[in-house]
Image: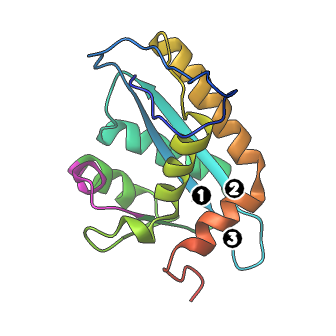
């Protein structure tokens, strides 16, 4: 709920101020994927926002199910080494769904993950200087910003291009 403060413009002598409630531990968690078929194709983005909770194994299974429903053909999911990604629940689900194959980024390598660029962009553009008055406003603003980003195929492609990983080798 604490705003991410970003430099902004204001009339001379009128310093902008952000007023917000302090010590709020309420939050929005997010799961996201940027899907690319092959070089030259336009990327797609899917996401899920979770009000006041962390993503756990069951939620990752639901998200993987969503990917299966929205993407045709064989799917390779490359993700970080979060414990929930490697859980028994997720592994059992993956054994039953052969269309999805998983690979992991190396440990401590967020710069390889295009979705990390998505989250940074969201925070520093869509949500910068937002002092949400409640969780509902934070949810609405996050969803609106993510939907705007999803429509910007050039930005999604930039997240993939900026990663030093070669996803098309």
Residue drawn at x 45%, y 65% is 113
Query: Do residues under tags 2 and 1 come within 8 Å of each other at their CB atoms?
Result: yes
Badge 3 is on which residue? Answer: 37
Badge 1 is on which residue? Answer: 34
Q: Is residue 77 above or below residue 118?
A: below
Can you say which quadrant of the picture contains the C terminus? bottom right
Whether residue 164 can be seen here: yes
Tell me if 157 is positioned left or right of 55 in this view. Answer: right
On the image, which quarter does residue 122 sit in? top right
Mark 3: few, some, or many residues within 10 Å (few <14, many ≥20)? Answer: some
Q: Is residue 137 above or below residue 40?
A: above
- Secondary element at tag 3: loop
Q: Where does the magenta region start and end?
A: 79-88
Q: Is residue 121 magenta?
A: no
Whether residue 72 can be seen here: no
- Secondary element at tag 2: strand
Tell me if 34 is positioned left or right of 44 in this view. Answer: left
Residue drawn at x 78%, y 77% is 40
Foreground: 60 or 11?
A: 11
Badge 3 or badge 2: first in the primary sequence: 3
Residue 37 appears at what percent x and percent y? Answer: 68, 70
| Distance Cα–Cα, label 3 vs label 2 | 9 Å
């Amino acid at each position: 709920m604490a705003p991410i403060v970003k430099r902004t413009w204001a009339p001379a002598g009128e310093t902008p101020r952000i007023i917000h409630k302090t010590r709020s531990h309420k939050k929005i968690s997010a799961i996201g994927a940027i899907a690319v078929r092959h070089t030259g194709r336009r990327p797609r983005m899917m996401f899920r926002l979770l009000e006041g909770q962390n993503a756990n194994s069951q939620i990752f299974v639901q998200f993987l199910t969503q990917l299966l429903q929205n993407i045709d053909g064989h799917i390779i999911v490359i993700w970080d080494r979060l414990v929930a990604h490697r859980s028994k629940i997720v592994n059992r689900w993956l054994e039953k769904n052969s269309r999805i194959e998983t690979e992991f980024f190396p440990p401590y390598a967020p710069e390889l993950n295009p979705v990390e660029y998505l989250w940074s962009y969201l925070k520093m553009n869509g949500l910068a200087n937002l002092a949400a008055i409640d969780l509902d406003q934070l949810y609405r603003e996050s969803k609106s910003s993510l939907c705007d980003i999803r429509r910007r195929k050039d930005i999604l492609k930039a997240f993939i291009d900026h990663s030093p990983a070669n996803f098309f080798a």
